[in-house]
Amino acid sequence: MGLKLTDQLILLLFLITLQYHLRLCLCNNSSSFGCREDERKALLEFKDGLKDPAGRLSSWVGKDCCIWRGVECHNQTGHLISLDLGNTKQSFVDGFFNLINTWALHGEIRPSLLGLKHLRYLNLSGNDFEGTPIPTHLGSLKSLAYLDLSGARFSGPIPHQLGNLSNLLSLDLSCYWSNSSSYLVESHWLANLSSLRVLHLNNVNLSRTPDLLESLNKVPSILELRLSGCSLHVPPSLGYVNLTNLLVLDLSGGTVTVGSTIPLWLFQLSRLKYLSLSDNNFQGLIPGSFENLTSLKVLDLSNNSFYGQFPKFQISELRKLLLSKNYLNGSIPENLGQSFPGIIELDLAENQFSGVLTQVHFANLTKIESLDISSNTLELDVLSTWVPPLGLTTINLANCQMGPRFPAWLQKLENVYSVHLSDTSISDALPHWFWNFSLNIGIINLSNNEIKGKLPPSLEHLMYLESINIRNNFFEGTLPQLFPSTLQFLVLSKNSFSGSLPPDIGEAIPNLVGLSLSSNNLTGSLPKSLCHLKRLVRFKLAYNHFTGEIPDCWGQSIISQWLFMDLSYNELSGSIPTSVCSLPLTALYLSNNNFSGLLPLSLGNCSQLLILDLGQNKFSGVIPAWFPERLPLLKVLRLRSNMLIGDIPPHLGYHVALQIIDFADNHLSGAIPHSLGNLNAMKVAPLNLDFSVISGTFALYLGQLEVIIKGREDEYRNLPLLVFIDLSINELSGEIPEELARLSYLQSLNLSGNNLTGKIPDKISNLVWLESLDLSKNNLSGAIPQVLVNLTFLSHMNLSYNKLSGRIPSGGQFDALPDPSIYVGNDALCGFPLDVKCETDHESKKEFPSKVENGSERETTWFYFSIVFGFIFGFWSVCGALLLNKKWRFAYFRLVDHTYDKIYVYVAIHIARMKRSHFGSG
């Protein structure tokens, strides 16, 4: 039988609600006695303390408060017993990172509520009390049986006075946001809630209460306990386990301390039906003791560090088994249907399972509805006549080897809703039956294969279709002219589609959230109907052949979410229309087109922009000085390869967020502003810069950027890790400002191809994270500062074609840069790696031969010692930590590049010294 959560949980919630409302339903929230005056006054005083921007309490007028919105009275006594002011409207984050909910109540919860002495139900969830503490006087509402303050933005300590609510059956103090500042200092008062059935403390900081579970162990009445994301210490033992009535236990979301194993007392909760330990760092083998939980219906162990083979326990009642994102390996057993005969959902994604799956593995899985075995090393090898479990509605086989033929068995799943077959090595033509085999289809993902074919002229008959992703295949032909209005995501990029966009695409697909048609052969102009898309978040038409101007109709759009717009690499022309910045744009890519004219003042209205890429166009005029004030969130400003003139505005240096500046290949003149040394975002570690703001389940997508660093052009997708300035190929003059050395996290500085004079500042050695330095093709003079050898991450440098003189520094990173071309064009330079001896070389070699030889021998010894020691220390301090902590891996990819450079330096120094020795003796 189907399972929504558990039958017992549904019954529990039904009984709790029924207890408060059953006797009210006949009177439709009114009382035969009418509203009591003292309680009406208490409500009005409570209302006076609130701010109600949406007018939700506008009905709170007149004498009979029992008919007011959210108010319920007892049908016999007339006493107010229920106040339901919960807000179900979701919050969102605006471009300035402010939490916005126009339906939320604000203000204070006044003590006048204590006048409601018979109040049994109080729901203030989803409102916004702006970080104020939970009022202690709520603990005096002695009749309360149901209290819900979840997601109401309280902060500070949870008051122990709530322990006075001895009649409480359900308490929910959860926070919606994981970085909540609500916390629990002491937990002994929870033991006073002897009638408590349901307790939710999700995302409340419980790290200060190590005895919480011991306190709850004294409340055997608890049936449901949710402690997700709480930083809770879970004791290995509870002594005598008193929570034997527990049906639901949620310890997910980083609740458990790092490196833990599953505590044995969990296996004594014999009545447990729902157990979630996901998103922690549990380690070791999955215990067979789960078999003791014979009533278990849902087991979620996903996103941990479990290893070993597929667990061998058998639980006949189990309906959902979620093991994704672990390190499980080996083969998947063939007896799944015998071990879990009632299984409905099986998720084994993102593990290390390997081997071949045949139809035997799916035998007896007659009730399964959802199967996810994606991102393993599995091969699906079934007979062409195989009949899959016909109840499947969701199937995800991404990254499984199942090609080259398109799976014919899919046609038999007539009720399937979601199909994920990406990266499955299919190199076949899409069969003619595909767009008709299931009229219930809602999600299609065939991306990253070699599937050939065309889309039908109409997909309108697929009434439940929400998402199509056939990215990176060999599809061709024109786009369908008719789509179902339910479609939200249309991803057809990296194919060979041709023709133009349907002229009424905006009206035909009004619910479109993501539109990605990049890297095709589409032509024609952009239809004005695009302006009618009201929910658009991601809009990518790059790498096509669109012509004409961007339609100037965006002012009529009512898009309220963040918007990513990429129209780069087309043949669009004209100016940027004024109405574009009526959209809540966060990323605007218009590079590699034919746009012209001045940079419009209207760009200043894009106040939520994080990325602005206008490179490789024909913009002229000066760089506006209003960027810091009008675009305060801007992190990436790319204006390279245009026809801009004039000075770099000094005011730009006071921008608080910029971490990527690319003005290369223009006609900029004047001096480099000293104020650029004030760019605060370049003084902070890039990992601390918040590029990805998460609101609910929606994460802001920022895309990629083509960047010239280290002398080559690469496409960077991890923009939060980039910090660089490129002012090359302009007409800048004057000296290099020493203030640039304040930008301690700068990774690349390119000032080449200008008319800069003076010396290379010694303080550039303060740029300890610098990887690339290009000062070539200027008029710099003087010696190369010896302190530059201390730039330990420097792997690319070009000082050619200047007027530098003296000995080239030796040691450190300079020994790892043996290419003489990086110094060419400086006639007065000498020393390695140039074939020009310095005047003092010959005398030095005669005077100190033994010293050089002894030093070389010692350096060789220390070189090999450092390799051995570095390997041992580096493995356990870095690699070992990465094995234990998944979150650190997101920063790892940047570290790989740096580590490679360091190893390269050690080897190159040794080789360079041998070359120098040879050069000196020749």
Image: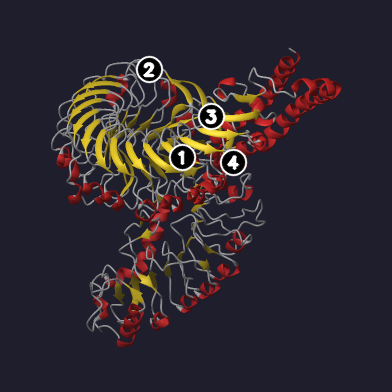
Q: Quadrant of the C terminus?
A: top right
- Residue 873 place in picture, x, y as percent: 72, 34
Q: Are marks 4 and 3 in contact (CB under 8 Å)?
A: no
Residue located at (73% from left, 27% from top) = 867
Residue tagged 3: 802
Q: Distance between the residues labelled 1 and 2?
A: 60 Å
Q: What amino acid is labelled 2 in the image? A: Gly
- Density class for disc 4 (Cα within 10 Å; few <14, some 14-19, many ≥20) is some
Left or right of residue 116: residue 199: right
Q: What residue type is labelled 4?
A: Pro
Which of 503/49 is in front? Answer: 503
Residue 88 placement, left or right of 341: left
Tell me the element at label 4.
Answer: loop
Give the answer, above or below, for where 721 lies relative to 244.
Answer: above
The spot of residue 196 in percent (x, y) is 49, 66
The residue tagged 1 is 733
